[in-house]
Image (cartoon, grey):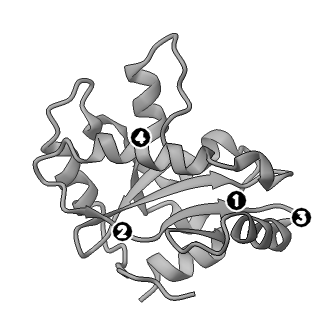
Amino acid sequence: MPVKNRGIYTSKDCIETWANSCSQQPSPRNYIYSIETILHKDYKKLSCTEFSDKYAWDADAYEIACKKGTKRDETVDFVVGLENGQLLMVEAKLDVENVTNLKGEVERKISHTKSILVTSLHFKSCATPSVVLFGGKNLERNIRRYRNMRNNKTDIVPMSLSDFYKRYFVD
């Protein structure tokens, strides 16, 4: 599947530049962690050491800090800064059993997260496509079903964690 605006992660500089120019409180810069840390928060048994030195903005942790005691499931899991200045939104569904339960959910999370991202003076654009990560024993089936459920639209690409790493973190 072709990638429209392919960017490669080179360092955490892009996401830090974005976060440092946000005037929101709490400051988004306080929520930049390794992707391994972000994924391990929800998926304790997951081994993803290849992401230990790759950093992203933890949109879920930020949302929780902003909305104490309210509904807190409106953002994607994390946002990665790419070398071309674009921001890549990523939703992880590594243990999902039934992708039909995701109908519309990921799209809403992307839309809400983008409304936060655009508030930065250094916002350039969001990378297309956004990514939804799948894992587990039904990985290939879930990827296929998610594509079919969305009529093969290419604005959100389902992929495995290893494919995500190969596409955005390896030259």
Q: Depth check: 142 or 163 in front?
A: 142
The residue beneath circle 2 is 127
Count of numbered marks: 4
The mark lying in front, picked from 4 and 2, is: 4
The mark lying in front, picked from 3 and 4, is: 4
Residue 120's disc number: none
The three-letter code of the residue at mark 2 reads Ala
Q: Position of residue 156 (x, y in %)?
A: 54, 66
Give the side of residue 82 with respect to residue 45, left or right: left
The residue beneath circle 1 is 47
Query: Is 141 drawn above or below residue 133 in the view shown?
Result: below
**Residue at x 27% of width, y 55% of height:** 15
Image quadrant containing the C terminus: bottom left
Disc with the residue nearer the chain's start (1 vs 2): 1
Q: Position of residue 72 (x, y in %)?
A: 53, 25
Image quadrant containing the N terminus: bottom right
Residue 137's disc number: 3
Binning the other alpha carbons within 10 Å of mark 3 as few (below 14), some (14 to 19) or many (20 upward) gives few
The three-letter code of the residue at mark 4 reads His
The three-letter code of the residue at mark 1 reads Ser
Disc with the residue nearer the chain's start (4 vs 2): 4
The residue beneath circle 4 is 112
The three-letter code of the residue at mark 3 reads Lys
